[in-house]
């Protein structure tokens, strides 16, 4: 097939851009793939981070045409014409936020009118983690042009069917990222990070209210009463960092926490995952989390909450623990059980088997199936 893939791609940073690159790479094994991306992604007023651009020297750039300005409909028209000129068999949209729905609707509408191309959406999310007025209406506008949908968790499927009950769709678990290098022994990683403790937990990724970092911080003193542990908090703060620092001081556990409040380039991700015993995701809400797939790439157990698709990816008692959201005590008990019962080795063996389920080949086959009339 001749495929046009539309979504964030290099030089844009972050998990969605990384997954666009990997999807293009795996589709290109059997098909002709052209990637069209943005020349402006988020307007600065909606982006609280330091930079939207990739800083990593090791993420392989994707050959992509930077055509779309998310705020300029004139670029949408020019991009739609470019897609028509390419005469694709399939136009594949990477959908993750309704902010982009009107742009995608404009492109998809033109494609439906001017070509015979099939239109599919690969949906990381349907509705945003932090809802805003009109989210559902915007998604409906874009999705009415789709011939099919790939959803990456059961929660996303339910959101899709709440909008279009008869939508043709397939559920494929979010694949392993495969991009990150730098795996090393725990001992070497901890020496590099100057960590002396024998027990290390990792909270990784952008810090936003729905990710529940404050819940993990409230659980930490309960763990420290029984055993020493080092918590690594690694990621850029999209919430006020000062409030978390103050909470740590109030709880009296600042000395047991290392905070790295920056976006981590791909070549540096490995050292943090290598250093930890387990990854902790105390989310209040979720569809799924790419952090689980990064953890699995490095064969790390995950302790998470029973929200969204997280319990689909983390098998309780097998590849990690799944606890109730908003429950610091339950979270602390899971962490203590992980260490007291020496669960890491068994969980790692299970992860090595389980992660075969998160293959990019499954996603490629779903695209091929839905692309057929």
Image (cartoon, rainbow, N blue to C red):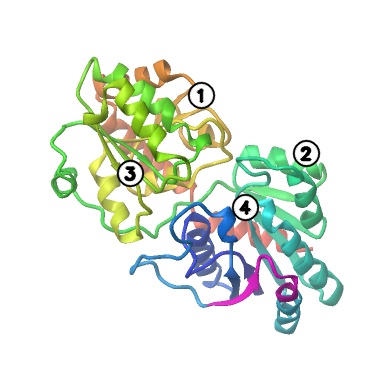
Instruction: Give me the disc on residue 162.
Output: 2
Q: Secondary structure at mark 2?
A: helix
From which residue to which does the magenta span run?
A: 64-76
Q: Nearer the viewer, residue 302 or 207?
A: 207
Distance between the alpha carbons at the discs numbered 4 and 1: 23 Å
Q: Are marks 1 and 3 in contact (CB under 8 Å)?
A: no
Residue at the location (71% across, 40% down)? 159
Q: Which residue is mark 1?
A: 325
Residue at the location (37% across, 49% down)? 297
Which of the two discs, 2 and 1, sits closer to the camera? 1
Q: Which residue is mark 4?
A: 96
Question: Residue 67 magenta-drawn?
Answer: yes
Distance between the alpha carbons at the discs numbered 2 and 1: 24 Å
Question: Tag 4: Cα neighbours inside 10 Å, few (<14), some, or many (≥20)?
Answer: some
Sequence-wise first label, 2 or 4: 4
Q: Are marks 2 and 3 in contact (CB under 8 Å)?
A: no
Sequence-wise first label, 4 or 1: 4
């Amino acid at each position: 097939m001749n495929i046009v893939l539309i979504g964030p791609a290099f030089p844009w940073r972050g998990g969605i851009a990384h997954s666009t690159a990997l999807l293009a790479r795996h589709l290109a094994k059997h098909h002709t793939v052209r990637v069209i991306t943005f020349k402006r992604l988020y307007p600065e007023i909606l982006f609280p981070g330091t930079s939207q651009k990739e800083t990593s020297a090791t993420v392989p750039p994707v050959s992509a045409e930077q055509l779309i300005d998310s705020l300029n409909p004139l670029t949408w028209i020019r991009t739609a014409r470019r897609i028509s000129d390419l005469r694709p068999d399939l136009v594949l949209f990477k959908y993750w936020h309704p902010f982009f729905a009107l742009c995608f609707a404009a492109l998809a509408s033109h494609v439906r009118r001017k070509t015979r191309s099939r239109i599919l959406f690969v949906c990381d999310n349907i509705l945003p983690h932090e809802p805003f007025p009109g989210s559902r209406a915007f998604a409906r506008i874009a999705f009415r042009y789709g011939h099919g949908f790939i959803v990456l968790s059961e929660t996303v499927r339910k959101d899709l069917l709440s909008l279009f009950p008869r939508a043709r769709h397939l559920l494929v678990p979010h694949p392993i990222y495969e991009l990150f290098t730098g795996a090393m022994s725990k001992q070497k990683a901890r020496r590099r990070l100057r960590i002396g403790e024998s027990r290390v937990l990792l909270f990784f990724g952008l810090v936003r209210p729905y990710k529940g970092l404050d819940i993990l911080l409230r659980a930490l003193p309960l763990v420290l009463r029984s055993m020493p542990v080092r918590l690594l908090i690694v990621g850029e703060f999209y919430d006020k960092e000062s409030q978390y620092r103050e909470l740590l001081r109030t709880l009296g556990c600042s000395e047991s926490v290392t905070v790295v409040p920056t976006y981590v380039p791909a070549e540096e991700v490995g050292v943090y995952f290598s250093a930890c015993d387990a990854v902790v995701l105390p989310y209040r809400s979720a569809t799924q989390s790419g952090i689980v797939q990064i953890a699995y790439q490095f064969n790390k157990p995950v302790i998470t909450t029973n929200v969204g698709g997280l319990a689909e990816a983390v098998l309780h008692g097998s590849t990690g623990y799944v606890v109730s959201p908003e429950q610091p005590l339950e979270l602390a008990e899971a962490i203590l059980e992980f260490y007291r019962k020496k669960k890491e080795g068994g969980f790692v063996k299970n992860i090595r088997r389980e992660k075969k389920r998160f293959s990019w080949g499954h996603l490629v086959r779903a695209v091929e199936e839905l692309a057929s009339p």
